[in-house]
Image (cartoon, rainbow, N blue to C red):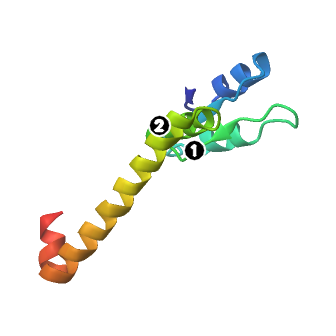
């Protein structure tokens, strides 16, 4: 559940369901989302809300998939493949950096 400002939505949803709830703090103009983050992570005991970084809905989606993958082997396999591609991407960037040097590499990104 994405939420900005006082960010009540994830906590309200979590209080109404026994299922996992993932809160995504939304960046605000006044406090850049820190207020949303604090509101989501400071839930009372017994009503947990999983929380990701401010504005990081992508990680919220990945976390939801990982939760589902704990009981679905085919989904777990896809998560593992995705993570492997992330690792390969980092190695490709490292190789390009070594070949180009940092100054040229920085002009390319």
Q: Quadrant of the C terminus?
A: bottom left
Q: Are marks 2 and 1 in contact (CB under 8 Å)?
A: yes
> Who's the residue at 77% across and 35% down the image?
48
Q: Nearer the viewer, residue 28 or 22?
A: 22
Numbered circle sitting on residue 74: none
Q: Is residue 55 visible?
A: no
Please state the horizontal and vertical placement of residue 79, each as a whole percent of the image: 47, 44
Q: Residues within 10 Å of mark 1 (few under 14, many from 20)?
A: many
* Residue 22 found in image quarter: top right
Relative to residue 65, is residue 95 depicted above or below?
A: below
Residue 46: x and y in percent read: 87, 33
The outermost residue toward the right is 45
* Image quadrant occupied by the N terminus: top right
> Looking at the image, which residue is at 66% across and 27% down?
10
Q: Which residue is mark 1?
A: 52
99, above or below 13, in the image:
below
Pinpoint residue 57: horizontal percent, then vertical percent: 47, 37
| Tag shown at residue 57 | 2
């Amino acid at each position: 559940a994405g939420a900005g400002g006082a960010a009540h939505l994830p906590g309200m949803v979590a209080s109404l369901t026994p299922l996992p709830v993932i809160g995504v703090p939304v960046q605000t103009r006044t406090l850049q989302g820190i207020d949303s983050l604090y509101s989501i992570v400071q839930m009372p005991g017994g009503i947990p809300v999983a929380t990701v970084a401010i504005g990081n809905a992508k990680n919220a989606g990945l976390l939801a998939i990982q939760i589902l993958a704990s009981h679905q082997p085919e989904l777990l396999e896809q998560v593992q493949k995705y993570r492997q591609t992330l690792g390969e991407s980092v190695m490709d960037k490292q190789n390009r950096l070594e070949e180009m040097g940092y100054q040229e590499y920085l002009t390319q990104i």
